[in-house]
Amino acid sequence: MPERVLLAIGTKKGLFVAEGSKTRRSFDLRGPFSPGVAVYSALIDARGKPTVYASSCNPFFGMKVLRSTDLGKTFKETKSAPAFPKEDGRALANIWSLASGDGKKDLWAGVEPASLFKSADGGDTWQMVEGLSNHAHARKWQPGNGGLCLHTLLFDGKRVHAGISTGGHYLSDDGGATFAASNQGVGAGFNPDPYPEFGQCVHKIARHDDAPGRLYMQNHGGWGEWDGPGGRRPDIGVLRSDDHGRSWRSIAKGLPSDFGFPLVVHPHEADTIYVVPLEPATRTCPKGSPAVWRSENGGDSWQRLSKGFPKKDSFFTVLRDALDADRLKSPGLYLGTTTGQLWIGRDGGESWDCLFDSLPPIHCVKVATV
Amino acid sequence: MNRVEAITVEVPGPLRAASGGAARVVVPAHTLRGLLEELERRYPALHRSICDETGKVRPHVNLFVNQQHMRDREGLDTALGPGDVVIILPAVSGG
């Protein structure tokens, strides 16, 4: 039985690790690791002996992958980081996602400029995944505000889903050997064609093993008032697919805004999902009043969860990887803000407490029970 | 054929994990480009911190030959000779 709850918190100024008991009443904080250097992605691989990974995105000396085998008490750089072949012409600008693969030491990395890398030895050596990195669309993708990033990697048997901003959703049916754009129904507000083949600004994609074929997406919404070519495109921000991501439909009705970054599925309920709607213009909490919104029926309706959050004057942003849920019986949600607060949403988000209120701006939060 | 000189390289604190903890390393080279190639062979992690995978010196890394920035010499073609010291320094920044 897992005894401890471990959080990896990637910030603008390094990686923090917080550890608490299963009661989750309080957490002890350690770090920063890789001090002063931004960490955009983290992974706690709790299969077997837990390993914590994080990307250290050093604007001076390049990207590194950090690894800890002692529950985040110490970190060492892996022997190498993803790197494009010399003749490719691209240079690694960031590591946006780290995901574990089938094999015990399989590790995948989604990077900027949007490309995919794979390691079979826990991050010591890396191979570029040609099927996506050299996809015919790859040189046509454009950076979003955060950069041209491959930020989401999901695995479902032989299927691999990749989320790219701005590139869209790409699906592999052959374990990552080849990929195809799979964006039917995914809108783009910044394109004359509201539903292009690719080029959407996907923010996050999530799935649950108990609902094969179903995917949820937080797309770049906020285009309800658009009056340019192609006409209005409301509710394109929160989407659902029931056919492995081949087609998508809106589930944004009932939300105060269809703009947001993270989307998380409840660990035990495939119909229960969480989003953090933000004002499209400022990308902060609507009316200065933070809330997480939950749907318990796969997006048909939504409830506002705000107990414990400030009722006003709060204008933070929650970035795409800064929301996660633990897997305990009554799961806790963990939400990091760009103002450096780490919140816990107890009982599946029913009530919120601030665990740490003065961390550096938070990029990502990952949780595991160990 | 010119003799290849042993050049001292000053390694800044944040990069010493990549040089086995050494504050300075000595490598044979007769140009700055050759020195970086030698660093890639001997200290690959140090080289990765100085240059990206296209071989370009990272934009926030400054290389000095003695007291002069490489841009004020001949860039990577700067000739190196006896007694020259190459200093690696991160550019100043804040935020």
Image (tube, coloured by chain):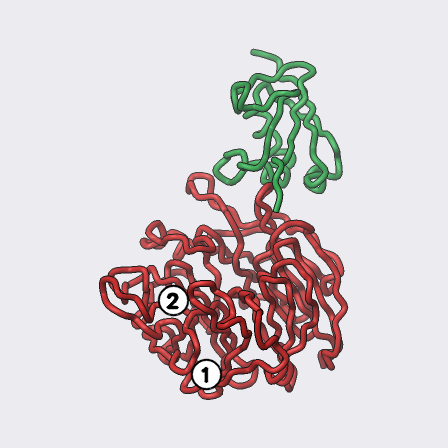
Chain colours: A red, B green
Horizontal arrangement in the rendering, residue A211 relative to residue A359 (left or right): left
Q: In this picture, is A328 found above or below A334?
A: below
Task: Confirm whether residue A347 shows in the render.
Answer: yes
Q: Nearer the viewer, residue A351 or A218?
A: A351
Q: In this picture, is A37 found above or below B5?
A: below
Q: Are marks 1 and 2 on the same chain?
A: yes
Residue A73 coordinates in the image, percent (x, y): 75, 61
Answer with the quarter of the image where residue A307 lies.
Answer: bottom right
Q: Secondary structure at mark 1?
A: loop
Q: Nearer the viewer, residue B64 or A43?
A: B64
Q: Quadrant of the N terminus of chain A?
A: bottom right
Residue A241 coordinates in the image, percent (x, y): 37, 77
Where is mark 2, residue-wise? Answer: A171
Q: How far apart in space, not on screen, are marks 1 and 2 (Cα)?
A: 17 Å
Residue B26 coordinates in the image, percent (x, y): 70, 26
**For mark 1, does the 10 Å Cα neighbourhood hold few (<14), some (14 to 19), or many (20 or more) residues?**
few
Where is mark 1, residue-wise? Answer: A211
Tell me the amino acid under the disc marked 1: Ala
Q: Residue at 72% x, 67% y: name it.
A: A18
